[in-house]
């Protein structure tokens, strides 16, 4: 079954749920992950991330600098960018609206578009005096106030106050790889990393404090529910939950020791995860 392939990206657009993964797989479900359909995708590389600007218009990114776009709610996808000669993956994508979007990935690659992806611009965000110019950027996120943040290897956190035109490297609470960031409250950023490391900032990233996630496995993905509950998940079934805005966590790790790379709540109270065993429905 296609839903049991190695799946990575996970998102929802309207009522439709999407998952992406190895071999150019993009699948979607209209019945809360009970049944899945496979999208028409013109490429067979691993698809790592997916983002929708509205219920019909979305983008997916993957290996070989692949960028795909859909305008029919994910049923068919068109290729916007493909550069196998660069031998570099794109690892995350986020669109503010149907025109403005960003993609990030391996070797410090940062791409942006202002016309829905007709033209993608490539930019170096590392400067020559920084130590690791080719470090991977793992994720890009927008804060509630509109600032953009990126997380990367060697403890690197970036912030842009001008929609990605310029980037500042922030003082970091940890020197290993950060894999993601989320925003538990309007003013709080939470970055999560290797080996259970995490940090919070209440001043737009100017200063960070380390927090105890209660686990020592790498944290790879996050979700903040409508009531403010923060869920972080990652390697070997690791799940931790916070009900105080990300300041303290309780270990709710799964018995299934799969690596959780995507996380989404379902209407039945369970959670959907993407993993090396495909999409799984779990209790958290």
Image (cartoon, rainbow, N blue to C red):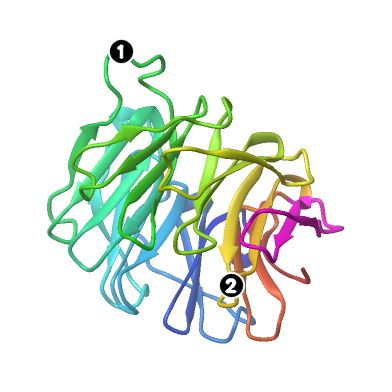
Given residues 249 and 98, the one toward you in this image is 249
- Magenta region, residue range: 237-258
Query: Element type at marker 2?
Result: loop
Position in image of residue 263 (x %, y %):
61, 63
Query: Element type at marker 1?
Result: loop
Residue 225: assigned label:
2
Given residues 104 and 178, the one toward you in this image is 178
Q: Residue beneath label 1, please? A: 129
Q: Is residue 232 left or right of residue 68?
A: right
Q: Is residue 172 left or right of residue 243?
A: left
Q: Is residue 283 left or right of residue 259?
A: right
Sooner in the amino-acid sequence: mark 1 or mark 2: 1
Q: Residue at x 31, y 52 (%)?
A: 147
The quarter of the picture where residue 14 lies is: bottom left
Tell me, yes or no, whether the highlighted magenta stretch contains residue 243: yes
Q: Is residue 167 above or below residue 262?
A: above
Cα distance between the residues tagged 1 and 2: 40 Å
Position in image of residue 200 (x %, y %):
56, 46
Tell me, yes or no, whether the highlighted magenta stretch contains residue 198: no
């Amino acid at each position: 079954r296609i839903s049991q392939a190695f799946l990575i990206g996970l998102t929802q657009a309207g009522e439709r749920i999407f998952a992406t993964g190895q071999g150019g797989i993009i699948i979607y479900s209209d019945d809360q992950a009970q049944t899945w359909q496979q999208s028409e995708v013109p490429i067979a590389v691993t698809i790592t991330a997916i983002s929708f600007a509205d219920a019909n218009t979305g983008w997916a990114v993957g290996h070989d600098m692949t960028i795909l776009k859909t305008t029919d709610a994910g049923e068919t996808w068109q290729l916007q960018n493909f550069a196998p000669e660069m031998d570099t993956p794109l690892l995350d994508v986020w669109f503010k609206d149907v025109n403005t979007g960003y993609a990030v990935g391996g070797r410090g690659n940062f791409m942006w578009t202002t016309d829905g992806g007709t033209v993608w611009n490539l930019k170096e965000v590392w400067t020559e005096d920084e130590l690791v110019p080719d470090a991977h950027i793992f994720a890009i996120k927008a804060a509630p106030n509109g600032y953009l943040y990126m997380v990367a290897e060697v403890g690197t956190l970036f912030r842009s106050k001008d929609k990605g035109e310029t980037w500042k490297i922030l003082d970091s609470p940890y020197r290993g790889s950060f894999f993601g960031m989320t925003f538990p409250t309007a003013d709080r950023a939470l970055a999560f990393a290797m080996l259970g490391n995490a940090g919070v900032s209440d001043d737009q990233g100017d200063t960070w404090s380390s927090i105890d996630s209660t686990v020592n496995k790498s944290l790879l993905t996050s979700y903040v529910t409508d009531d403010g509950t923060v869920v972080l998940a990652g390697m070997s079934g690791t799940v931790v939950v916070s009900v105080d805005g990300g300041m303290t966590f309780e270990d709710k790790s799964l018995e299934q020791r799969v690596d959780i790379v995507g996380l989404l709540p379902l209407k039945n109270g369970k959670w959907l995860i993407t993993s090396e065993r495909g999409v799984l429905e779990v209790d958290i």
